[in-house]
Amino acid sequence: MNTAKKPLPPGQREYPSFDRFGLGLFAKRFPANPDLVEFTIGGDVAQSLTIGREDLAALPRVEQVTDFHCVTTWSVRDVRWSGVRFSDFYQQVVLPRAKPQEGADFVVLRGQDGYAVSMQLADLMEQDVLLADGVEGHGLGLEHGAPLRLVAPAHYGYKNAKHIGSIEFRRSRGNYRFPFPYPDLMDHPRGRVAYEERARFLPMWLIRILYRALQPSARNKMRKALQAHLARKGK
């Protein structure tokens, strides 16, 4: 039997652990209640909604094992996620209750920590895209986006919004922008790993070098901030 691992996507390197990682601005930002699953649906919809754990509990639960690829060129293989498919959530909750307007296929996901990122609705409807509340058989924890996060394996990690606080369905980009002070060019319209859509306008070889250079400081900042936060909470 051939047990060889499949090749990593272009420009990626395997990393030995799956730690909290993100933009430095958000290192010290955490959700107020990481145990409470509650977020809003808004934008160009007929009816805004507040979604709770009971709404997700009515949907089929799934588990999947997929690789995770960070835009800064590191990857972790075989991460086991659990949650509900975004497509089920959209078809069974968003469409009948929120009633998005025709053409509302630009989706903005906002985290409770102030982070925001955009996705295409067509990409979110893929069968391996989850609203996840578990990883490796337990809760997400603060390091992986509790209480709820997006898991979109075909897209770089920065598209996989953590600590979800709201989801907006829009007909256009409107006034959305990537979190200031980071430039909008960091947010590719799709962000697909297979096509190395890391950002807009800049050459990929340059982005790889820049992002790899930023990894150590980002990891250190994220680790220290999480440790300090847990210490304050007595955990």
Image (tube, grey):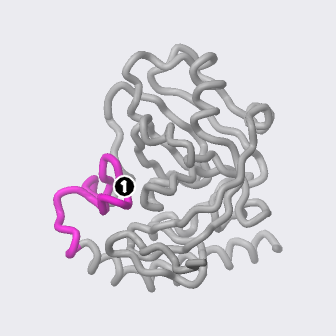
Picture coordinates of residue 75 (x, y %)? 48, 74
Main SS class of the magenta portion in the image: loop
Quadrant containing the C terminus is bottom right
Residue pointed to by mark 1: 192
Q: Disc 1 marks which amino acid?
A: Arg
Relative to residue 36, is residue 193 depicted above or below?
below
Decide if residue 59 is on the left or right side of residue 206: right
- Rendered residue at 34%/84% (across/down): 213
Residue 195 counted in the magenta span: yes
Decide if residue 141 is on the left or right side of residue 106: right
Relative to residue 182, is residue 149 depicted above or below?
above
- Rendered residue at 77%/38% (across/down): 53
- Rendered residue at 30%/52% (across/down): 188
Location of residue 2 by image quarter: bottom right
Relative to residue 147, is residue 55 depicted above or below?
above
Location of residue 41 by image quarter: top right
Relative to residue 157, is residue 217 depicted above or below?
below
Picture coordinates of residue 176 (x, y %)? 35, 40
Location of residue 71 by image quarter: bottom left
Picture coordinates of residue 166 (x, y %)? 57, 38
Q: Which of 56 and 186 is in front in this view?
A: 56
Q: What stretch is highlighted in magenta?
A: 183-206
Q: Which residue lies furthest to the top in this view?
A: 46
Residue 62 counted in the magenta span: no
Quadrant containing the N terminus is bottom right
Decide if residue 1 is on the left or right side of residue 69: right
